[in-house]
């Protein structure tokens, strides 16, 4: 972008420079031509003088009615200041030079220039000498007078003061003009000087120049464009760095707050650059750390509370066992203590599983498994417990395979079915399959009292128990559904609960991507639950 802008800027500047260069070259000679026409006494003499000038320059010169030439305000000011107006047609490489006449403002001279030749350059001193011819003995004075109209020096010098070789001096003796070219490494670059003999003054010559050739890329311009481009580039870099620095300060401030123990601050996410990704990662990390700390605190409070009950019962049982002499009562107390120990083991197992899933990414060994095998295994294991509940399995086809960690998927179905058996009246239904969008699902529903809508989110919280028929009396520690929720999260899916449309109780549905590597989804004949 900076390079394109620099190129356009050079083109614009050079367009203006070229126009000023053309005007500066023609201003002086235009003034001399205008004065030459003004000195002619009559109209015919003026026309004849213009014709001779046209032949000398080998360029057409037109005597034009001023009313037919449309000039801009700037061009009119140049005419009034006895300067030339140059209009350049870049498509045809033709320049039109318009010259005002001092004694005839109703007419202009128009010169059409299609190319500049050496003969035209050598003709320029002739017009100056023609002007000076009318002021014999005052050449230097009038030369100084017209110098202000020329952008390059014009002066009369002794021939020996001009660096000429013998051939060039010989051509001057033959009344021929000589052009001197000089290449220079200075700012002026290549220059041209025109040396012309002065009639009746063999020891003197008229020197026009040196006239600098137009340089499209002079040192000043290239240096200026380079510096300006660097300035624009610096502004662009600064414009990029400034918001980046501001975002870095925000992240640094948030990190300092985190170091001091404040995890509530979040970094604003702006845009989609790497700093936005960093801010998002920081926010996710803060959320995760804050959630871990809160979960740890909640876990400690809940564990201390949940452990108190079985431990108290075991202590009470041991005290009763020490005081009991009857064998049958002693065995009954032993059985009760054994059940409490088993309950304690179950609680510890759930706490360990929940803590493992909550505090970081577990080691998941995803593999392609047959969904029916997991559902059928849980159904068989549940029926073996003699719960006196009807377990209905609507099996998916054997070709339905999903990507999952078998151990954790079994734990999900086991916890959902165990929860449903605990709260149902008579029946539990198990289904599974793959949705048309490629999401696998397992669904467990029961005919129990269900879960009120306002409590459906809270039911997945650790150690949560609802103040309805799903109470402590039915057993459990409130960790089963929390474990299911965390497994669903690590599977890249979700767990939802609503009302079973057919059984009337609670319906739990866990969904997750059936194929982790975006394989085409398998289609089943069985319609998934809505």
Image (spheres, helix red, strand yellow):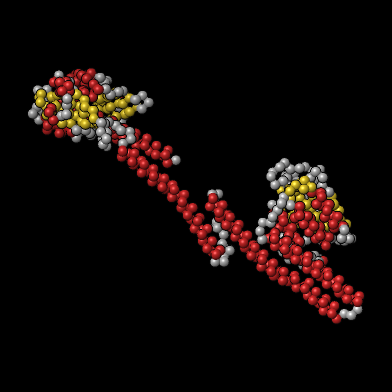
Picture coordinates of residue 294 (x, y %)? 65, 65
| Residue at the image position 84 percent from the left and 55 percent from the top | 379
Q: Quadrant of the N terminus?
A: top left
Number of numbered markers: 0
| Camera-side residue of 214 and 186 | 186
Q: Quadrant of residue 33?
A: top left
Q: Does 159 sit above or below residue 456?
A: above
Residue 220 seen: yes
| Residue at the image position 75 percent from the left and 66 percent from the top | 348
Is residue 476 left or right of 175 when viewed as pictured? Answer: right
Q: Does 388 sit above or below residue 368?
A: below
Q: Does 153 sit above or below residue 435?
A: above
Is residue 31 left or right of 312 when viewed as pictured? Answer: left
Is residue 128 left or right of 58 when viewed as pictured? Answer: left
| Residue at the image position 60 percent from the left and 57 percent from the top | 284
Picture coordinates of residue 285 (x, y %)? 60, 58
Picture coordinates of residue 39 (x, y %)? 16, 25
Q: Quadrant of residue 314?
A: bottom right
| Camera-side residue of 525 and 399 | 399
Residue 23 seen: no
Q: Quadrant of residue 58?
A: top left
């Amino acid at each position: 972008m900076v390079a394109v802008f620099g190129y356009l800027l050079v083109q614009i500047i050079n367009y203006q420079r070229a126009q000023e260069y053309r005007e500066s070259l023609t201003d002086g000679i235009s003034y001399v031509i205008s004065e030459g026409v003004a000195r002619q006494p009559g109209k015919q003499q003026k026309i004849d003088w213009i014709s001779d000038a046209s032949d000398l320059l080998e360029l057409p010169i037109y005597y034009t009615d001023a009313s037919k030439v449309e000039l801009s305000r700037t061009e009119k000011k140049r005419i009034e200041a006895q300067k030339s107006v140059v209009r350049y047609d870049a498509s045809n490489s033709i320049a039109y030079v318009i010259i005002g006449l001092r004694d005839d403002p109703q007419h202009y001279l128009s010169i059409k220039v299609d190319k500049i030749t050496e003969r035209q350059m050598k003709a320029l001193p002739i017009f100056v000498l023609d002007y000076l011819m009318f002021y014999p003995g005052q050449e230097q004075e009038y030369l100084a007078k017209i110098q202000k109209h020329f952008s390059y020096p014009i002066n009369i010098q002794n021939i020996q003061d001009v660096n000429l070789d013998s051939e060039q001096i010989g051509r001057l003796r033959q009344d021929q003009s000589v052009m001197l070219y000089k290449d220079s490494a200075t700012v002026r670059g290549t220059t041209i000087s025109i040396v012309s003999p002065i009639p009746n003054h063999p020891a003197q010559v008229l020197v026009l120049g040196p006239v600098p050739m137009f340089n499209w890329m002079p040192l000043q311009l290239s240096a200026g464009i380079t510096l300006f481009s660097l300035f624009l580039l610096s502004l662009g870099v600064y414009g990029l760095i400034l918001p980046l620095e501001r975002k870095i300060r925000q992240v640094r401030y948030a990190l300092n707050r985190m170091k001091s123990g404040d995890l509530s601050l979040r970094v604003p996410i702006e845009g989609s650059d790497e700093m936005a990704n960093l801010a998002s990662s920081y926010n996710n990390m803060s959320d995760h750390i804050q959630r871990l700390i809160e979960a740890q605190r909640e876990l400690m409070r809940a564990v201390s509370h949940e452990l108190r009950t079985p431990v108290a019962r075991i202590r009470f049982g041991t005290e009763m066992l020490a005081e009991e002499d009857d064998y049958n009562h002693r065995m009954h107390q032993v059985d009760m203590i054994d059940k409490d120990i088993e309950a304690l083991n179950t609680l510890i197992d759930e706490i360990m599983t929940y803590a493992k899933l909550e505090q970081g990414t577990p080691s998941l060994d995803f593999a392609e498994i047959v969904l029916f095998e997991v559902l059928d295994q849980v159904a068989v294991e549940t029926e073996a417990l003699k719960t006196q509940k009807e377990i209905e399995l609507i099996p998916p086809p054997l070709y339905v395979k999903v990507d999952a960690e078998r151990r954790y998927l079994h734990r999900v179905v086991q916890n959902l079915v165990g929860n449903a058996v605990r709260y149902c009246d008579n029946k539990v239904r198990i289904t599974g399959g793959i949705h048309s969008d490629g999401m696998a699902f397992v669904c467990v529903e029961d005919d129990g009292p269900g879960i009120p809508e306002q409590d459906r989110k809270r039911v997945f919280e650790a150690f949560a128990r609802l103040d309805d028929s799903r109470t402590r009396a039915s057993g459990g520690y409130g960790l089963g559904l929390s474990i299911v929720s965390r497994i669903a999260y690590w599977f890249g899916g979700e767990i939802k609960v609503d009302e079973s449309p057919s059984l009337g109780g609670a319906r739990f549905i866990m969904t997750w991507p059936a194929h982790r590597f975006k394989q085409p989804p398998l289609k089943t004949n069985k319609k998934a639950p809505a």
